[in-house]
Image (spheres, rainbow, N blue to C red):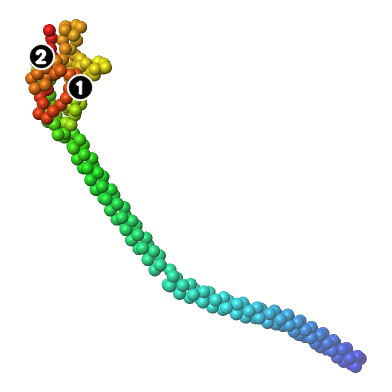
Amino acid sequence: MFCVANFCLRAEVFFIYELLYRNYVSEMEVYKYHLAICGGKEEKMEKETKKLNKGLMIGLIALVAAIAVMAVLFSKYGKKPVKNDATGSQSSVVSQEQNHDSQNEDQSSESQSSESQSSESENQTTVGSKAVTIDVINKAEEKTTYQVNTDAECLRQAMEEAEGLTFSGTESDYGMMVETVNGETADYSKDKAYWAFYVNGEYCMYGIDSQPVADGDAFSIVYTAE
């Protein structure tokens, strides 16, 4: 009976030992497997991390080198040429404006000289070699005197050059027959009035288109009624 109990106890202890050993072995295998898996992942992660770090370092070095190159190029070809171009363009603009102003001044001086020349020529044409006097005596016996310097050959031309003197009439084969002088009309058919022309106090023998003009002549145009 004792032997059977002893055998059972030993068997039970062996069973418990066997169970514990197998459990330990299984746990060790699980732990080893876990280490194998985790260790592989850690090595892989470490390798990838090293690769990433290496790529990052290379990228940083390349970035620093590119920044350095850009800084050198910018310092050499950057703002200075632009400033020079700006100053050059400003100087060119200023020189162009100065040239334009000088051209305008030259043109204005030329125009002024041409105007002065034209005025001189006008004065030369207006101022003739013959100095004549034309007196107009209207119906109210009011006299208006015109001093004319002319080169006219006939009285009509001298009358046309007299400033302020106006006249009109009827044209014929013998020239103009004057009817109106300074706005006053002499109508012979109405009141037998006409404009009589005198030169140096004598009655003109010719019409105004044929009456000669000499230096110092004094002409009179008189409103006359019979």
Please report the residue visible at 62 percent of the width from the left and 80 percent of the height from the top: 50
Q: Is residue 161 above or below residue 22?
A: above
In the image, 210 versus 31, the foreground residue is: 210
Q: Is residue 187 left or right of residue 94?
A: left
Tags 2 and 1 touching, CB below 8 Å: no
Q: Position of residue 92 (x, y in %)?
A: 35, 59
* Image-quadrant location for residue 173: top left
Question: Which element is circle 1 on?
Answer: loop
Three-letter code for the amino acid on which mark 2 is drawn: Ala
Residue holding disc 2: 140
Three-letter code for the amino acid on which mark 1 is drawn: Ser
Q: Is residue 51 left or right of residue 162?
A: right
Q: Position of residue 142 (x, y in %)?
A: 9, 18
Please report the residue visible at 14 percent of the width from the left and 34 percent of the height from the top: 129
Q: In the image, which disc is placed on residue 78? A: none
Q: Position of residue 148 (x, y in %)?
A: 14, 29
Residue holding disc 1: 210
In the image, 112 versus 197, the foreground residue is: 197
Q: Which-is-in-front pick, marks 2 and 1?
A: 1
Q: Going by the picture, which residue comes out furthest to the bottom?
A: 3
Please report the residue visible at 24 percent of the width from the left and 44 percent of the height from the top: 114
- Mark 2 closeness class: few <14, some 14–19, many ≥20 residues within 10 Å: few
